[in-house]
Amino acid sequence: MQVGNGAFAFGADVTGLQTFLPFAIMSSWGWKNDSLPPGKTIEDVENYKGDLTNVQQELDLWTGTITSSFTFQGENVIVQTYSAQSTSTIGIKIDSPLVKSGRMGIFLDFPWNDGSAKFSAPFVGVFSATSNHTSVLRTGGGLGRNVEAEISHSLVNSTFITSIGGDKFTISRNSHAAHRYTLRPTGNGPSLSLSIAYSLDSPKSVLPFKSVANESKSLWAKYWSASGFIDVLTGSTDIRAHELQRRIILSRYLMRVNEAGDTPPQESGLVNNGWYGKFHMEMVFWHLAHWALWNNWDLLDRPISVYALFLTSSIQRAQLQERYHSGARWSKMTDPSGRSAPGEINELLIWQQPHPLVFAEYEYRAKKSKATLLKWLNVVNETANWMADFAWFNASTELYDLGPPMYVVSEDTSPNVTRNPAFELAYWRHGLDLAETWMERLQAPIPKVWTEVRQNLAPVPIENGLYAVYEGLEDTFWTDPAYINDHPSLVGLHGWLPPITNVSSEIAKATADKVYTSWNISNCWGWDFPMLAMSAARNGEQDKAVDWLLHPLFEFDDIGMPIGGVRVPTPYFPGSGALLYAVAMMAAGWDGSNTAAPGFPTSENGWNVRVEGIHRAM
């Protein structure tokens, strides 16, 4: 709490002073001027420029090669950068007369990071807190094959290994007070080729530079040629086709770089840290579902394996911690341990629950095998068990309700009064439909409680002929900023979700039209726009669908990063995943569609769409 007078304020903890918490004592007059460094003037600041000239940089998407060229101290420099595909290794090659003359090398610097910041962007870690961590350099014998130097970097109880191999070099620590190491070539030629590998343990070997480059070229070519592709540019006359094609291709590249690991990705992938670096299980759909439609099961299999890995802890969460009778409750925000991050929203959000049923269905459609049915059986069974248990029987209506307490998709309603939210009810019904179909394919008995709950879920709430965010919400919510400022999940009822019993496509369309005119679209972000596009596409409004995908507030920067905007730092990759899912759905169609590219305007209206290897959406 504070006392003050507008020009001076004192912040107090529970003692009325600052005994336990160092709150600020601040004033409008208490300014401190930080002077320029010694010997520098304001003219130096105004005249400052970098030391590089003739700078050019190109990313070859087909091979995964960054080629950077510039002039430094009057000499040309060319740097090639690759990433291995089988290990966490980069390969770099520097070509310059400066290498031959001994005037150019590289340095390795290691920052401190403690994960205390909710967002660490655009850079992760700080290089000034050198006393918080340690690093040790090893050279000489006893290292792995092709390893000339190894640096162990320890942050509290975690140690990470950096291994360096390649052309001959010397390496030394700049200062014991810092964690920067300088590497200088000792050969006579004008080039330096290195491989730098990152791992938890000392490797037995490090790939040579050429092997890293060859892996990159081979795997990227396979990625582009063997999976799905969508061409919206060739033959299209709409001037926006070029921008949409750019977004599609760059998103395909960036998603493979950032979002195909052994666990689901965090919101910013591997660019920086957001939400403390943890991943969000409700966002897994937007991050990963596009892989299914683009036929990249080799990449999707990796992160969705966490459903089997986290099954035991999710059962414990539901039955031991929360005292449900059966089933597995999937966490909202977690890490590779599967633990649920603390926080009220993390325990009260539920729309992540049906996601594994959707992934399982897409895999079965792609592979049509009994092995797939058995692979997912336990996850499907325990997911649906908890969904049925979470729904509670309302004796007054003789129907099953969802909540309270719970949060809706947009996390902006009071959890203690939120009952029967529209999107969650529809998604619950869809999920239980999928679970029952799964058991039918296996010719296995369907738990009676699944059918009982599915057939008797409360109806999707309607107010004045339109779907409402949740049951009992006053119909004036359409003009209340508290309810129309975040994710417009009402448009997901018929668009993101397929046709569902008890969801009227006519009412869903009327609701979507109301969202278009009443929602604060200026506050929408990321996956909101592809979700709006999918709704428009399924409702037969193809022009509007394209408009949403290219909305001025749905931005991608010059290298294809999805801009976070005012809400979150860049990149916000759910926007990229949602874009790819929506485009695939609009181009290849969905269950029940019977025309080519049903989500796009026709060629007479400016769009020519060619599709290869893309699966239909549900």
Image (spheres, rainbow, N blue to C red):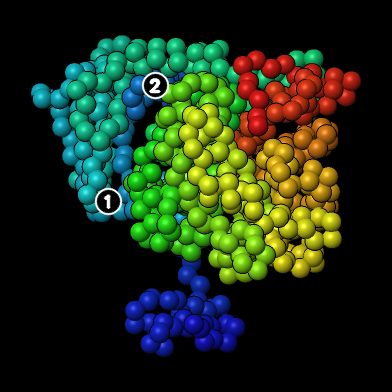
Question: Foreground: 365 or 287?
Answer: 365
**Residue at image point 37% right, 76% down:** 21
Mark 1 → mark 2, Cα distance in angstroms: 32 Å
x and y percentages locating residue 536 in the rendered image? 78, 38
Residue bearing the label numbered 1: 130
Left or right, residue 31 beside residue 193? right
Residue sitting farthest toward the right: 604
Would residue 176 be seen by someone viewing this image from the given angle?
Answer: yes
Count of picture labels: 2
x and y percentages locating residue 598 in the rendered image? 78, 26
What's the amino acid at mark 2? Gln
**Residue at image point 77% right, 34% down:** 537
The label shown at residue 342 is none
**Residue at image point 46% right, 23% down:** 370
Label 2, residues with CA under 10 Å away: few <14, some 14-19, many ≥20: some
Left or right, residue 320 beside residue 617? left
Q: Quadrant of the C terminus?
A: top right
SS under mark 2: loop
Give the vertical position of 494 relative to 106 (above or below). below
Q: Quadrant of residue 55?
A: top right
Q: Which mark lies nearer to you, 1 or 2?
A: 2
Give the vertical position of 274 relative to 446 (above or below). below
SS under mark 1: helix
Question: Foreground: 529 or 142?
Answer: 529
What's the amino acid at mark 1? Thr
**Residue at image point 58% right, 42% down:** 431
Residue bearing the label numbered 2: 85
x and y percentages locating residue 443 in the rendered image? 50, 30
Would residue 274 be seen by someone viewing this image from the given angle?
Answer: no
Give the vertical position of 116 relative to 611 (above or below). below
